[in-house]
Image (cartoon, rainbow, N blue to C red):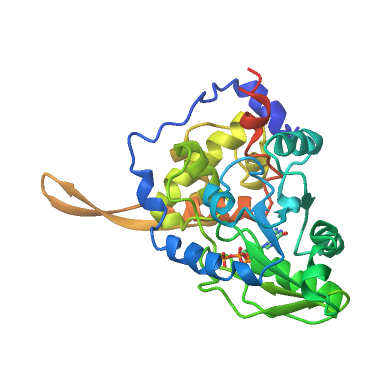
Amino acid sequence: MRLSPRALCRAARPAWRESFSLDGRDVARWFPGHMAKGLKKMQSSLKLVDCIVEVHDARIPLSGRNPLFQETLGIKPHLLVLNKMDLADLSQRQKIIQHLEREGLKNVIFTNCIKDENIKQVIPAVTDLVGSSCRYHRGEHVELCLMVIGVPNVGKSSLINALRRQHLRKGKATRVGGEPGITRAVMSRIQVCERPLMFLLDTPGVLAPRIESVETGLKLALCGTVLDHLVGAETLADYLLYTLNRQRLFGYVQHYGLDAACDDVVSVLKRVAVRLGKTQKVKVLTGTGDVTVVQPDYPAAAHDFLRTFRRGLLGAVMLDRDVLQGPPDP
Ligand SMILES: Nc1nc2c(ncn2[C@@H]2O[C@H](COP(=O)(O)OP(=O)(O)OP(=O)(O)O)[C@@H](O)[C@H]2O)c(=O)[nH]1
């Protein structure tokens, strides 16, 4: 009889970690200082802009947004687009919305830019937000300009392309990539709609210069907003394992054919590497000199674990569950 991952977990009765230790790593260097430049450029383009569309990852709806956006660009009407809804566990959507409302964010749309879900809600929401003020300013030529902002890799360029597909039946105007930092500069205006005539400025992803906490940094990294090597793929894989276990998301057990859920990342990565057939030769210093040994390729296993999670193959996740609910149930 094949046991379900949940049954396997119950049978093994493992003790999940209550917190994640980073042993004093320097998280400040994960967040490159050059991003301040992008923010300055965005500020200088503000006079052209009627509305700010901030894109953020729906898996972290309550953390990791750049507070500088509010400080420097907060004078314009603002729409928050929580993208990658296909990867997020949104069973507590109402609670998320209430939480955001308490922070003053009243205009929120959840989207999936791969399948164009809810994309058609964006332009009417912007038109409502801007209201009649732009008609007053621009006379007969009703023409709106939006600025799309957000931390890296949340889908800003994908949103622009999705809007063009939906409203203009046109293809890609801006490059999309799986790694953070694809959009390097504030671009020229891109048309996204005919009626109303609407243009949009794509911008480079800008992270906060200082993060709220190590945990927020790890959540941002798990969502791919920071290059993996800056955090370390194995550290990140460990945080992923910690998160999945804490949230009782045991899809990885079945996906990698493990015997049971486990909270020890070395054991899990070892099994992943064996399953993938990934080994590496490592030189080990012994009393008689260097000896080459073959061992599981832990970095390759960590990358596969992260990639699989980011593709949604380990299940939808809510990384801000702790913020929403306080400490998880024992
Ligand atoms: N699953 C899923 N993936 C998405 C979605 N939207 C975008 N992506 C993927 O996320 C990655 C980043 O998308 P981009 O549009 O390049 O993100 P960006 O915010 O413009 O990135 P930067 O230029 O680095 O700031 C790409 O691999 C996209 O295919 C979505 O709704 N769901």
In the rendered view of the protein, which quadrant contains the N terminus?
top right
- Horizontal side of 146 relative to 38 (left or right) equals right
The one of 52 and 324 positioned closer to us in this rendering: 52
- Horizontal side of 252 relative to 99 (left or right) equals left
Residue 34 picture quarter? bottom left
Relative image position of residue 121 (x, y in whole percent)? 86, 59
Which residue appears farthest toward the left when viewing the image? 288
Relative image position of residue 29 (x, y in whole percent)? 35, 51
Q: Is residue 280 above or below residue 9?
A: below
- Horizontal side of 144 relative to 274 (left or right) equals right
**Residue at figure coordinates x 83%, y 58% from the top left:** 125
Observer able to see residue 92? yes
The one of 179 and 72 positioned closer to us in this rendering: 72
The one of 255 and 70 positioned closer to us in this rendering: 70
**Residue at figure coordinates x 59%, y 57% from the top left:** 73
Relative image position of residue 221 (x, y in whole percent)? 51, 50
**Residue at figure coordinates x 79%, y 39% from the top left:** 93
**Residue at figure coordinates x 70%, y 40% from the top left:** 104
Observer able to see residue 296? no
- Horizontal side of 71 relative to 166 (left or right) equals left
In the rendered view of the protein, which quadrant contains the C terminus?
top right
Which residue appears farthest toward the top when viewing the image? 330
Relative image position of residue 111 (x, y in whole percent)? 78, 56
Residue 100 picture quarter? top right
Ligand 1 shows up in the quarter that is bottom right
Q: Is residue 15 above or below residue 266?
A: above
- Please tell me how many numbered marks the rendered image carries: 0
